[in-house]
Structure formats: C-alpha cells, structure tokens
Amino acid sequence: MTDYWAITGISSSNIKGVEGVGNKGAMALLQEHASLQAMFDIANSSDKRLLKVQQQQQEAILSKQLVSLKKDIQLGFNLKDLRYPKT
C-alpha cells in the first residue's frame, strides 16, 4: 500500500507522489513490477508511466517515507496507561 501511495500521492495530506501517474497507472505498474524498488531497478523501458516513476525517483522515495507508519517511536509511557478504567 505504501508503494501505491508513494506513486499516487495523498492530496488530503499534501503528499504529491509521482506527477502524471494516476490510480490506474500505479496499480498497473505495481501488478507488473511488484514494488517501487523493482521499478527503479528496471533499465531501458518504453513504458511512459515507468519512466515517470524513474525520473521522479527522489520524490517517490520521499512520498513513501511520508506515508509509512513509524513503529519504533519511544512514547515515554505505556499505551495501557491511557485506557479508561472499567467500573
């Protein structure tokens, strides 16, 4: 899902993605190449959508970082402490 969002972007979060590749194009590329990294590794393609992704590689990588969830953040407390006590 993060590769898809990295390509299409998320307008409500102001994440641009790859300009010129829409939802259908992103789905087709991911079905063919399986991942964003695999798209970067392809050489000499005539697919215009793939070329756009490769030309905007840095933007796609940044977009992927922005849409990825961070799981290693230290909160300084336990989430169980925030639960509402049962009565």
Image (tube, rainbow, N blue to C red):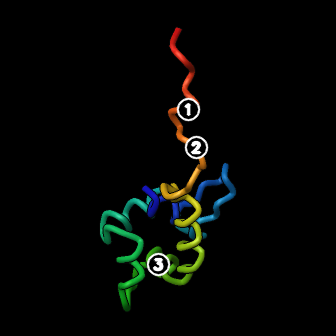
Which class describes the residues within 10 Å of circle 2: few (<14), some (14-19), or many (20+)?
few
Tell me where residue 83 appears, x and y as whole percent: 54, 26
Per the image, label 2 sits on a secondary structure element best described as loop
Identify the amino acid type marked 3. Answer: Lys
Q: Residue furthest top?
A: 87
Camera-side mark, 3 or 1: 1
Tell me where residue 56 appears, x and y as whole percent: 57, 79
Identify the amino acid type marked 1. Answer: Asp
Q: Determine the CA span between mark 3 and mark 1.
A: 52 Å
Mark 1 and mark 2 in contact? Answer it, CB < 8 Å: yes
Q: Determine the CA span between mark 1 and mark 2.
A: 7 Å
Query: Relative to residue 39, is residue 13 depicted above or below?
Result: above
Provide the residue designation for mark 2.
77
Closest to the observer: 10 or 72?
72
Q: Residue at x 44, y 77 (%)?
A: 50
Provide the residue designation for mark 3.
48
Label annotation for residue 23: none
Q: Residue at x 46, y 78 (%)?
A: 48
Per the image, label 1 sits on a secondary structure element best described as helix
Q: Quadrant of residue 37?
A: bottom left
Tell me where residue 35 appears, x and y as whole percent: 36, 69
Q: Sequence order check: which comes first, mark 3 or mark 2?
A: 3
Identify the amino acid type marked 2. Answer: Phe
Provide the residue designation for mark 1.
81
